[in-house]
Amino acid sequence: MTLHTVAVDIAAWQTETFGPPRQRTGPVEHMAKEVRELHATLDVLRVCTPGSPQHAYYHADALKELADVFHLMVQVASDLGATPDTFAAAVERKLAVNRQRKWKAPDARGIVEHVK
């Protein structure tokens, strides 16, 4: 299964479960919550010994949190009127822009920004 196929399934399920797409802030707030949970999981994963049962557990948990963020990204895109295809096209356009940019070295927190 591809991410595109999953996004189509997510969009259909979301419409069936939550009603037609509409612009609202709830999914964005929910996404911020899931990103905080992902961040906390990654903090724990960084100190786990690779190959240990704890590492395997937190690795799987990080992927679960990332999947939650993806679900919400699809929902927000749908709320904005984007289909999985138009959302994917927007992501591809942004990748093309990022490829043309110059990038700074990571800061103390590991954040890499483009040169303005």
Image (cartoon, grey):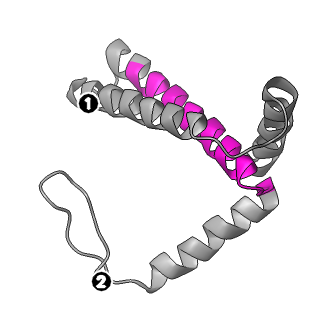
Query: In the rendered image, which quarter contains the C terminus?
Result: bottom left
Quarter of the rendering containing residue 39: top left
Q: Which mark is residue 30?
A: none
Image point (62%, 65%), residue name: 91
Where residue 69 appears, x then y in whole percent? 55, 37
**Vertical comparison of 91 with 80: above or below:** below
The residue carrying mark 2 is: 116
Where residue 31 appears, x then y in whole percent? 51, 36
Q: Amino acid at mark 2?
A: Lys
Query: In the rendered image, which quarter contains the N terminus?
Result: top right
Image point (33%, 83%), residue name: 102
Q: Secondary structure at mark 2?
A: loop
Q: Nearer the viewer, mark 1 or mark 2?
A: 2
Residue 80 in magenta?
yes
Q: Residues within 10 Å of mark 2 (few under 14, many from 20)?
A: few
Quarter of the rendering containing residue 6: top right
Q: Is residue 41 left or right of residue 83?
A: left
**Vertical comparison of 116 with 23: above or below:** below
Q: Which mark is residue 43?
A: 1
User: Is residue 1 visible in this depiction of the protein?
Assistant: no
Range of residues picked out in magenta: 58-84
**Vertical comparison of 94 with 101: above or below:** above
Image point (31%, 27%), residue name: 40
Q: Earlier in the sequence, mark 1 or mark 2?
A: 1
Q: Secondary structure at mark 1?
A: helix
Quarter of the rendering containing residue 72: top right
Q: Is residue 93 left or right of residue 17?
A: left
